[in-house]
Structure formats: C-alpha cells, structure tokens
Image (spheres, rainbow, N blue to C red):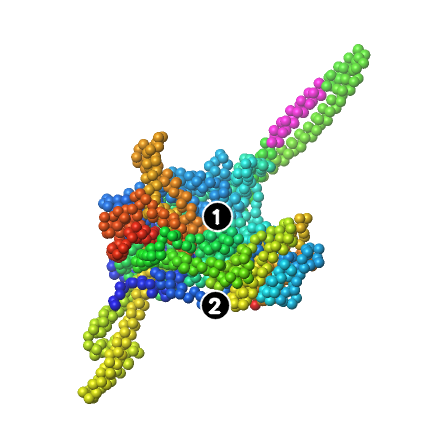
Amino acid sequence: MPRRLVCGSPEHGIARRRFLGGLGIGAGAFAGGLNWLAHPSAAHLLEQRRRQVVVFNLAGGLSQLESWDPKPGAATGGPFRAISTSVPGIYISELLPKTALQMHHLALVRSINTNENDHGKGAFMMMTGRAQVPGVDYPQLGAVAAKALASPEDTLPGHVQITPGGGGQRSSDSAYLGPRYASIVLGGGSPPQHTTRPDSISDDSEQRRQELRRRMNHLFATKRRTAMTDAYVSSFEQAQEMMRRREVFDVALESEADQDRYGRHDFGRHCLLARRLLEHGVSFVQVTHSNYDTHNENFNFHLEQLGEFDAPFATFVDDLAQRGMLEHTLIVVLSEFGRTPGINHLFGRDHWGQAWSICLGGVGIQAGAVIGATNAEGTEVIDRQVDHGHLFHTYLQAVGIDSTGSFDIDGRPMPIADPNSEPIQELLS
Amino acid sequence: MSAIVARADSIRSVGWRIAFLCLACQPLATWGAENPAATEASRPLREIVDATFAHRWGNQHWPLADDGEFVRRIHLDLLGRIPSIAETRAFILDTSPDKREALVDRLLSDPLHARRMAIWFDVTAMERRAATHVPQDEWLRFLTDSFAADKSLEQLLREMLVADGSPEQNRAAAKFLLEREVDPHLLTRDVGRIVFGMDLQCAQCHDHPNVESYHQADYYGLFAALQRSAPFKDAEGKLLVAEKAEGEFEFVSVFTGDKGQARVRLPDGWPLLEPAMAPDDRYVVAPADGIRPVPRASRRSMIASSLLTTPDRSFARNWGNRLWALLFGRGLVHPLDFHHDDNPASHPELLDALAEVLLRERGSTRAILRELACSRAYQRTFDVERAMAADTMEWSITQEELEQLRRDFETAADTELRARSARDTARRDWVTAADSRRDAISARLALERTLASTSSAIQGSESQIQQLSSRMTHLQTAIEELQKAFERLEWPDAPVSIGLLRERLVSSQTELEQTASQLQLQRETRLKAESDLQPASIAAMDLESKCAIAEQQWQAAWDHWRNARRDRIAREDQLYRWEGLIERQRARKAFLEANLMATTLVDRLKALEAVEAGSSTDGLEYLRRNHGQLPEFTPAARWHEAWMAVSQAAAESDQELAAEVRNRYQQALISAMTAAKASLNDELDLWQQRSQEAREQWASIAERQGLVAGLTGLTPEQLAWSLMQATGVLDGQIAACETELAASPDATTPDPTARRVAAKLLAVDRLSSSVTTFVSLFGHGAGQSQDAFFATADQSLFLGNAGVLQSWIGTGGDSLRQRVLAAPSPELAIEEISLTLFSRPATPEERLLWIEAISGEQVDRQSLVNEWIWAGLTSIEFRFNR
C-alpha cells in the first residue's frame, strides 16, 4: 500500500493541468491512460456541439453565370436557363437542378469583388482572407479553423484536404500557426501516410515495443516533465489512435447504398469521405473539385463539371440536414474568382474577380439568404459589394470564432482575420 | 553610470532583509549592486556568464552535469549528433582534470563542427526555403568554408548583403537575396528579423500596434536601403541583383494617414547618411536596356558596412543571442527575432557582454562558443533533484518594499519615455540637417563639375575661333590673289573659283559667329558658376557646421536616453530578480510541504494497516480518532455499540443474534477501514501530484535562472544524425569509406588520421540525403521561423511504420544491435544500449526490466533487441537534448 513519493503514475497524467499554447499537442495523454478515447463517437462530439467547416473548392474559377448568378437572356448570359429553387424567388443555373432543391439550407453571396484575376493571388485571398503582401504569409482558413475549433484531445487531424491527386503528407498552409495545424492531404482520398504497420513487425512485437517506450518515458518523466515532453508523448498516442481508427479514412466502409447515392466517381467518393470525416469529428475538411478554368468551351466544360458536382453536393447537403449536422457544420462552396461575363471567341470565359458569387450554408448562416446583386449583364456589383476579407470574417463568425480577436503567437498577437474588414452581419443568423 | 550607483544606494536604503540559512559564497554587500563582472570588458566571457548568474540568482555552486550528460550535450551542440559509444567511454574514463575544456577544443576544431555550424546558419538565414537560384550544396560549401576559417558573422553577413550574384563574386553568398527573389518587402522583413533580430513586419502598414519601439519609419528605413535593389535576369536567364542609384519612397500609415519619406536607417533607428555625390557620378554601370545597373554608392553596402557600428549594437546583440540560443536552447531574448524594449533580455548584462565580445573579437564564433561551453552555466546538471538539494538560500522582502521597487521602475520608465521622445526629435533635426548638408555639397560638387567642364569647353571654343579666323584670313588672301590673277590673266574659270571660295568664307564666318556666341554663353555659364560657387561653398560649410551641431545635440540626447534606458532596465531587473527569487522559493516550499504531507500520509496509511491487522476494538478506536468524520465510520460505531449491548445484555441467551450483530459490525468496520484508506490514498495522490507540480514549477524557474539545464528538442538534422550514430549506420558508412579510400589507387591521403577525417566527411556527404525526410517531417514550413519544438502524429507514424528506422536498427557490421546480441551477459547488453543511446549507464529499473524481459520463456532475442532499441530511439530521453 505505501507508495513512492513522486510516482507520476498514469492516473495522474490525465486529470492534471493541461499544457496548451504553441506546442504540438496540448493535453498530456500519458503512458497509455487514454480514457477519453473509449468514446470518440459522433454522439459524444455532438454533445460537445463542436463546430465544423467543410469547404468545396471549385478550383480554376467557377463561372457565376453558369451557377449561382445566372443571367438568362442577357448578351453575357450564355445558353443555359435559370431554374427556380426550393426558396421562392431564388433562381440558379439549370446546371444545378439537385442543388436547387437544397437551396433552403443554403445562401448566396452575389456581390463579390476581389478585383484579382490571378489564380495564385486569388486563391491566397479566398483561403486566407487577406491580400498577398510580399514577405508575409497567412494561415489558411483550415488552419485557423483547426486551431480555434479542434480540441487538444482530438486524435484525428483537425485540418484535412481531399484532393484529386498527390498528397499523403502534411502541407505548409498554416504559416505562423505552426505544423500542428497544417493540413494532412488525402490525395485521391487515400488515408494518411504510414498508418499501417510493416509486416515485419508482429502484433506482439508492436505491443511490446510500445509498452517499453511508455515505460522508458514514464521513468524519464519522474525526473523531468515539460509541455514539450508531454506533446512528444501524445504524438505517439495520437499516431496509435490514427492507426486504430484508420477506417475513418476508408470510404469503402460506407454502405453500398450511400456509395451509390454519392456516385461511384472521385468527386462523389470525396464528398462521402468528407461526410465520414465530419461525422468522426474532424474540424475542417476541404474537398477540391477540379478544374473550372474554362478559357475555351466554357459551356461544355461547366455542363460536364457541374454535372459531376451537382448530385453528390446536393446529397451531401441533404444528408447533413437529415442528420442534424447542419446545426454545427458550415458549408462553403468557393473558387479563387469567377469568370468574365464577356464570352471570348473560343466560347470561353476568362478570369474575373470583379463581380462573382459563392454559396454557403449551415451553422450560423441565414438559410435562403441572398446577399448583394450584380447588374443585368453581370458586369458590375450594384448592391452590397464585399470581398475576401468580409467572407473570411463571416465564415469564422458563423462557427462562433471571434474573428476580430487575435492569436497569441509566441507573445505576438496576430489578428485572426484582416482587422480592416468585418463580417457580413446580415448573412449571419 | 552615476545614476546606477545612486540607484544601488537607494535600493540598499530600502533595506533588504536577506537571511542566508546556508550562506555559501554570496557576500551580502554585493546584493542590489551593479553586477561587477558584466562591466569588466577584459574578463573572459565564461566568468562574466557565471558571475552574472551567481549575482542574480545566488550561490554559484550549483551542481554540474556529470560526464555522461556533458559529453552528450556538447556533441549535440557542437557536432550536431550524439557521441558514439567509444567517444562516451573514452571521455568518462579520461581522468585528466581539464578534460571538458579539452573536449570542447577538440570538437570545435573537428571539420564536422564547421558543417554543423553551416547547417545551423543555413536554417537560421534561409529558413528552409527551396533552393531555386543557388544550389544547396554550393551554399553549404560556402558556409562550411566560412566557419572552418572562423570567418566572423559580421563578415559573413556583410558578404551576403552586398553580394549581387555575378560570376566575379562568390555566387553562393547571394543566396540570401536571390532565394527571396530580391523582393524589397520580403528582404526588409527578413533582414530585420534575421540580421538584426527585429521583426518589423507589423510596422509595414502602420506603427507597430503592440510594440512601442517599432515604428513604421523603422520598417521603411530598412526598406529604403533595399527598395533600390531589384531582380535582374542576365542573357542566360540567371537571376542577379541589380541596384539603382535613385528612387525614394513615401509611405503612408493606414491608421493615421500620416506620410513619411523613407530614409535609410537600421532597424534600431540608427540613421545612415548617404554620401554627397554629383548626379553624373552615381553609377559604375549606368542603367540601360538589358544592362544591370551598379551604383557607386550602394544602399545595401551602406547597411552591410554598418553592422557593427551602430551604438545600439543591434547586430551584435542579435547574433550574440543566437549563439547563446545555439548552446542554451533558448535565447536570452525570446523569441529570437523579437528584440525590443518591452521584451527585454532575461539577463541584459549578459547580452551586453556577448555583444561586446562579438565586437571585440570581430565575431570569432569559435572563441565565443568555446567560452560559453566552458562556463558553469552551460554545464549545469539536468538532474532536478540534485539541483534542488543545493537550493538552500532563503530570503524575504516585504510587500511595501516590492511596491517601492515597482514604483521606482515606473518612474524610471516615464523618464525613459521622455528621453526617448527628446532623442527622436533631436534625431529628426539631425537627419534634416544632414540631408540639407548633403544636398548643398552635391550642389557644390555639381558647380565644380560645371566649372571644370565649361572651362575646357571655353578652351575648345577659343581654339576653334582661332582656327576659323586663320582659315578666313587664308581664304581672304586667296580670293584677293585670284581676283588679281583674273584681272591680269583674264582667266575664264576664276569667277567660279572665287564664288566657291566666297561661299566657304561666308560659311566660316557663320561658324565663327556661332562659336563666338557659344563662347559667350560658356563664359557666362562659367561666370555664373564662379559666382555661384562661393556662396554654395559657404552654404555647404555653414550647413556642415549646423549639421555637426545637430549631430552633437542628437548624440547628447541619445546618451541621455541611453542612461535613462539603462536605469529603467536596471530597475526592471531588480523587480524581476525579486519576483523570480520569490517565485522559486515559493515553488521549493510548496514542494517540501507536499513531500512532508505525503510522508505523513504514508505513515498514516502504515499505521492504519497496522491496526487493521490488530484487534477490531483498537481499529475502531483508531478510526474514531483519525477518521471519525467519514460517513462510513458512523455505521461501524453504531454496530459496535449494538454488538457491545447485545453481547452484554443477551450474554449466552442469543448467540445467534450476537454473532449476527458482530458480523454486521465487522463488515461495517471493514468498509470504514476501506473508506479511510481510500481517503488517505486520495489525499496522498493529491499531495504527490502537488509535489510533482511544484517540482516541475521549480525546475522551470530554475531553468530560466540558469541553475539547472533544460530540455531542447533535437533539430531535424540532429535527430537524423543521432539516429544514424546510435544505430551504427554512420560508423558503418565511415568504415566503408575508409576502406574505399585506402584501397583506391590514387589514395591522396596515405596518413591514416587524415584518411579517417576524409572518410568521415565522405560518409556524411553520402548519408545526408537521408536527412531530407526528417527535415520535411520534423522541420517547420519554408520561410517560417524554425525555432519552436512541435510534435505531430505523422512524425510518430513515420518513426513507427516507415521502415527507415527499422532498417537502420537492423543494419549490419558493428551496429548497436549486433553488439547487444553479442554481449556476453544481460548486464553488459543493457549497458551497451543505455550508453549508446543516452550516454549514461543503465538505471537499476532499466536493468531489472531488461533482465526480466530477456529471461522470459520463449524469448525471441532478435526481436526483443529490435524492440528495445526502437523504444529507446523513440523515447523522450533520445528526442531531447538535456
């Protein structure tokens, strides 16, 4: 019964003070005492009412005229019709018939003027909420969301990108927020790197070496324990958990019916994977759908691309609504810019940052709202002009982050969003 | 200085009450006085360091690291990897008294030390930016050569700032500028942060919102020096640095709308005056299409040549701080790129001393590292228990005294603020005067140039007039003679010829007139220049003296401010020092108290167990006395009463009832006992937890106060090389390279020692590609500060599953795995592991664990050894430098 005076036993590890701050991993998951991991269920997360963000990035620049702000009959309008939606008075392009039926969950901003026609700069603005300034790097929305929303107890990464290809590794999109909040890229929807054990190591051997590692750490911790050592120890427990929960990244485990509903193609699978990840509590998921850069044959390409986008996206919105997830999830559909109202001689539309649209919905957003308007030709914003800064503030406010606040980075306060901008208040619910 | 002495007196008059329980070495009189060591420039740096810590935090006889700790630490710091087991053994067995200093010297002269420094400098300066314009190996070679030659940091940075990437120069030196695409804003940010330790980024669009001493003008002062530089692509598409000799910049605050002209100044506010120059003289190579302009007075060179000249020594302080951080894991100023008045150094006098040495030694990095590594502060032990046992000093200060210190500090801060604004006004006046002076001198130079050029033009015109008039005389004579001949000879062609000659005469006449009027103009110009020159010279002289006066006034204001600042910092330090001492004492007392409580609780538990084993009545009595408040006690007491009553009253009549009651009583007693034990255990847990928290708190305070060594995460490179060292991969490669070199027919190094060195370098070259993966996983993003430790799951997944570590562990030859498998006894095997991985003998716990594991039934020894090595390599102890 008598115990050693300073035991640092596993039981103490969890209840003790938590080291937060600039370190990799906050809470001390110590020597295997991972009690909370026993119930990482969706119900548990729901109970916490944690807010989440999902972004659909239509890379290359979606045409607002073939999507959210159609101008049928105008010289610039192109061949497609506008159709009515589930919200009386809102019309969108006929290329999005299924999305139109979900409009009552969504809202539109039709008055964006970012005044930027360069892919890289436009994407930077939309993803960071700031204009690119030489010498300064800002964290992307996903990194900000992961830092502000993810719990230090999470074992899954807080910032995930699903891209058509590439990836597998951590990227460097978190700037001064540090690698902890950088995205893990699931290229082609495949799980993160190194999440399976090599065949050469047996289950027993794995168990023994991990146990041994814990015991060595335990012995060391009786001598010295700091926030850094806790973070290091936790990173191994997190890795173990990621391996244990590897199936979270495996979309094939979703029901056949769901896989059919979302479509047996990359984007469909990626949407379903996004749903799966959100259900398992990942704070931020971004799905990239590529490519909308239609300098020629704009109409054929949009017919094709949106044809692929419409059904899975509408299914996704519907599912989130059905499952009550819209109450804590923000959905954003964006691009780096829109496309020119003028149609070029190749039947294409070019880059256009002056008057374009995005779609969003879910937590914190007034469903069925339409912000701003463009003129009859779509060449100019005529009402409630906004830019990337307003949008960035709005996304954050919608999920309950005070976008006028600052992150404390090593004693340096870094404004979370551009201090010279503000949220679109009338869009927030 | 007088202000400081006065302060010392006034503080003493406040009346310290310092009670030394175990007074060892700190004479009372020096407390509260200026640290005498720091002011003595000629003292070796190590003594200054140790005297500073002793002065500040008391008692210099803090325990030092043992040999194992030291040998690991110094290898990681100076060579960038852990020592080999042979190096560790040799060092521990060495009995010479000065072996630490000898080891420091040996490592500093190791060629791999230059390489380690090159990588440190590369990561500091380039922050893992991609190598687009200068190949990484070329750059690392340049750096390695620089550090091998012990080039000063000042010279290195100077070369990097003036470099233009042209083939005449060492192109590698231009990497800093080229990989940033010569972008003036990016360069302003990074020159500020990296070269001067000042992150002025937030002052780009307005005065810094949170740092009072960072002004927009500081940002644009540096920007002004860099904005004339631009990227230039030569005919082959190679990027070079071009620089113009003109172009000013006006900045506007987005907050206030205030405008300002960007003037060249260093980030610490030190203005750099541009040389006066006639406009025509500005270029060595003038700008033209497809030509790279090279100015005569490069603004980049202005900065580069002033690195050590500014009175604030921001450059020297920054690099002193960075070298300190290299060995101590954390800067005196932290973050490293955030030097400013509101973020003072933890030990300002130490930073001053470092800057001083950097100036004096012209920045011999090696000399500074040697002094720091030989200080006692560097050699502090990591063992908190040992260090804590030495912390026996006690002190007290009243709340009023502390308040007084705070008030003194606030007064000093106000004084400094006023002195600062006076300094800024005086500086503005001086810079304005200096600008006028420069313009006046440029004007005078321009006039002198006009005079010189018009004089030679006048000479030209005069001689032309002479020629023309002699030609006209000639023509006139010829015409006259032709006329005469015509009259005499009736020559029919004569009128034509005369006509021709007349025409030439007329044109000469016109030319003459033109030249004459030109001459007239030139004479006027000269006259004007002559008459302007004198007033211009006088004006220039006048402005010269005005400027000199303004400069004097500014310097006086600056001195005044510096004294005020020093006073403020000294008072601030007093405050910090007392707060730090009190904090440390509090943590230690909390620790002792918690331990005492825990010991008492353990005793009580023992006592409880003793009575548990004894009679049940004694047990109840014990519980009544000690745990009577527990709810579980009441039923036990009641049942006891009942039992007593039953056993007395019923006597033999109702045995069954008595037994039942007795049984109930026993049960109630057991649950009361259990409850009491549980409550004691809970309390014990609580106090043990408090004890550990207090110990960790003490450790973190003591670490800041330089009494105990801290933990620093290994850099990606340190981690990779240490893993290769520990597993035996590195030694294996060295051995292979050595054999190869010995066998090669053109063996240039027949000397075995030289060959071994060559083999080491070759092996490191061959293995360095393995480091890349570690950098991408364990390093921060490109262009971000690389200082902070972080741990993410993908790193652990890599270490566990990627196969790299497994294959290293399984390496053949004289690897750790093979040595462990070949060890003659389990004791020697675990010794081999501990000494290799941690540079220390195995602890009794580890020995026990190992022997238990190895002597189990059906043990797969191969697999067991792999598991042990893997667990050791991924343990906290391996991951950190301590």
Q: Nearer the viewer, residue A126 or B116?
A: A126
Crowding around mark 1 (Cα neighbors within 10 Å: few <14, some 14 to 19, many 20+) is many
Determine which residue is flagged by label 2.
Answer: A46
The secondary element bearing badge 1 is classed as helix
Disc 1 residue type (three-letter): Asp
Letter of the chain that mark 2 sits on in the rendering: A
For the stretch drawn in magenta, the main secondary structure is: helix
Which residues fall within the magenta stretch? B453-474
Depicted B468 relative to depicted A402: above or below: above
Any magenta on residue B466? yes
Depicted A423 relative to depicted B361: above or below: below
Determine which residue is flagged by label 1.
Answer: B190
- Give how far across and how far down residue B12 sits, in percent: 33, 59
Q: Which mark is residue B375?
A: none
Disc 2 residue type (three-letter): Leu
- Give how far across and how far down residue B76 sits, in percent: 34, 47
Letter of the chain that mark 1 sits on in the rendering: B
Locate residue A280 relative to residue B443 in the image: left or right: left
Which is closer to the viewer, label 2 or label 1? 2
Crowding around mark 2 (Cα neighbors within 10 Å: few <14, some 14 to 19, many 20+) is some
